[in-house]
């Protein structure tokens, strides 16, 4: 019998694997959270499947999303990246990853960062440190943004991050398990609680 999944998944094997094994599972590693936030920013105006199919290319192009390395990228490196057919070749989006890495290094490169927290603790603070478990029956009930994602967006922008609007932040929160938005009929709903 076919597994019951959230309605957004579709038939693509990569999308199904992402939904079943990644989406909605809590992530606490700061560098993994940084990578996911950057990738969600790349999605703006595109489908997540487009970015998912390019994820390995992004990891190769952006030093596995190591903010310390990315923060050193210069204009010459940007020009090289803009020739990389494996990523979205949009100057604003490429520069956003570099800008976000520099902001990360400025505020979260050590435990004594401006927030007094590491990046993971900072991000998880917007949901009180533990996942919000929603009980949506259909994807139509799922909001595009919430007060929590609006607060996260505002705080990240204040620290110099970009491509982190409230809708992008909410998609990020869903992806890294800060909110469980698997619909209640999805086989992953109980697993993600």
Image: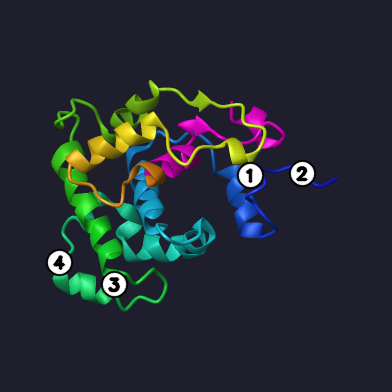
- The answer to whether the residues at label 2 and label 1 have Cβ atoms under 8 Å apart is yes
Segment colored magenta: 169-193
Q: Secondary structure at mark 2?
A: loop
Nearest to N terminus: mark 2 or mark 1: 2
> Circle 3 is placed at which residue position?
81
Left or right of residue 122: residue 178: right
Residue at 29% over, 72% down: 81
Residue 54 vertical position relative to residue 150 in the rendered view, above or below? below
- The answer to whether the residues at label 3 and label 4 have Cβ atoms under 8 Å apart is no
Nearest to N terminus: mark 2 or mark 3: 2
Residue at 18% over, 63% down: 73
Residue at 16% over, 74% down: 76
Quarter of the image holding residue 42? Answer: bottom left
Nearest to N terminus: mark 2 or mark 4: 2
Q: Which quadrant is home to the N terminus?
A: top right
> Circle 1 is placed at which residue position?
20
Residue at 42% over, 72% down: 86
| Res 44 visible | yes
Marks 4 and 1 sit apart, C-alpha to C-alpha, by 38 Å
Marks 3 and 4 sit apart, C-alpha to C-alpha, by 11 Å
> Circle 2 is placed at which residue position?
3
Q: Position of residue 138 (x, y in %)?
A: 66, 38
Q: Secondary structure at mark 1?
A: helix
Marks 3 and 1 sit apart, C-alpha to C-alpha, by 31 Å
């Amino acid at each position: 019998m076919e597994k019951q999944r959230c309605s957004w998944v579709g038939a693509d094997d990569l999308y199904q694997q992402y939904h079943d094994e990644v989406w909605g599972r809590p992530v606490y590693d700061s560098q993994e959270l940084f990578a996911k936030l950057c990738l969600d920013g790349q999605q703006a105006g595109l489908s997540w499947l487009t970015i998912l199919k390019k994820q390995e290319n992004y990891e190769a192009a952006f030093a596995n999303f190591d903010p310390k390395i990315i923060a050193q990228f210069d204009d010459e490196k940007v020009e090289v990246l803009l020739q990389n057919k494996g990523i979205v070749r949009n100057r604003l989006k490429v520069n956003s990853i570099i800008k976000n890495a520099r902001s990360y290094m400025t505020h979260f490169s050590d435990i004594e960062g401006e927030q007094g927290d590491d990046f993971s603790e900072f991000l998880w603070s917007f949901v009180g440190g533990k996942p919000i478990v929603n009980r949506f029956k259909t994807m139509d009930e799922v909001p595009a943004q919430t007060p929590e994602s609006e607060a996260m967006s505002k705080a990240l922008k204040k620290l110099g991050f970009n491509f982190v609007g409230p809708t992008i932040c909410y998609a990020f929160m869903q992806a890294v398990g800060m909110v469980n938005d698997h619909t209640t009929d999805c086989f992953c709903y109980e697993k993600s609680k």
